[in-house]
Amino acid sequence: ISFEDVREISQIFRTLELKDDEHQGYIHQLLEGSNVEFPEKEKKEDRDPQFLAWLEKMQAKADRELIFGPEKKTESIRSVSMEIGLGVNIIILMCTSFFVMYVAGKKAFPDSKILPVIMGASGLIGILVVETVLLIAREERSDFRRKLKNSKKEISKPYASRAEKSSSSGRRRDQKKKKA
């Protein structure tokens, strides 16, 4: 008996149970001694090899975490503490530069009340510009280091993957030549 036939018989029995209170039959009694043929599941072998590699990597990571416990996120804690330290440093520098320039303005212009404030504000803005330039330089340097680190990882990959890359780029060149 096919599985679809079993489903139809099951639906018929359900309707009989709802309609008739004296219904005595059960589906398992009716199907006793028969073999049910289930439809075969289609195997999907069209999976992407990169996806399978990623899946394997995630499985290995899950196994490691099961054995050794979850990895500690010290890198994120370090980066947060570095950012907080950088922010505090910038605020202290801004306050210090304002105070120094204000005192210098008071000494240079003892009769004026507005010029020391203007000099303090110019010191504050000046230090803010300097810190912004330094922050951009730090970010560029860390991006450069990250790219350099990633390029070193690419160099250490097996030769097979390099051959695949070069053959795929060769195919792209051939396709471009055909289009032209």
Image (cartoon, rainbow, N blue to C red):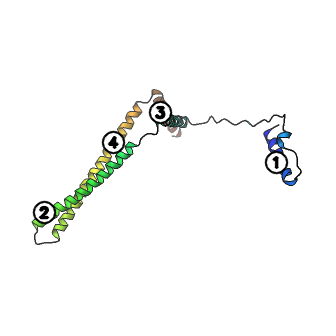
- At numbered mark 3, what does the secondary structure look like: helix, strand or loop? helix
Instruction: Say if mark 1 contacts mark 4, CB within 8 Å.
Output: no
Query: Three-letter amino acid code at disc 2?
Result: Ala
Left or right of 75? Residue 70 is right
Q: Earlier in the sequence, mark 1 or mark 4?
A: 1
Q: Secondary structure at mark 2?
A: helix
Would you identify the image quadrant in which residue 92 lies?
bottom left
- Residue 125 at x, y percent in the picture: 24, 61
Q: CA distance from mark 4 to mark 3?
A: 24 Å
In this picture, residue 107 sits left or right of residue 71: left
Which numbered disc flags the more N-terminal residue, 4 or 3?
4
Residue on which the image places disc 2? 104
* Closer to viewer: mark 4 or mark 3: 4
> Residue 119: x percent and y percent?
17, 65
Near-viewer residue (161 or 104): 104
Q: Which residue is mark 3?
A: 165
Quadrant into which the N terminus falls? top right
Q: Residue 106 at x, y = what percent? A: 12, 67
Please say if the residues under marks 4 and 2 sit with CB atoms less than 8 Å apart: no
139 to 169, vertically: above or below: below
Image quadrant assignment for residue 41: top right
The image quarter in which residue 148 lies? top left
x 36%, y 40%: residue: 146
Q: Secondary structure at mark 1?
A: helix
**What whole-number distance in Å separates the C-alpha atoms at marks 3 and 1?**
56 Å
Q: Amino acid at mark 1?
A: Gln
Q: Amino acid at mark 4?
A: Phe
Residue indicated by mark 1: 11
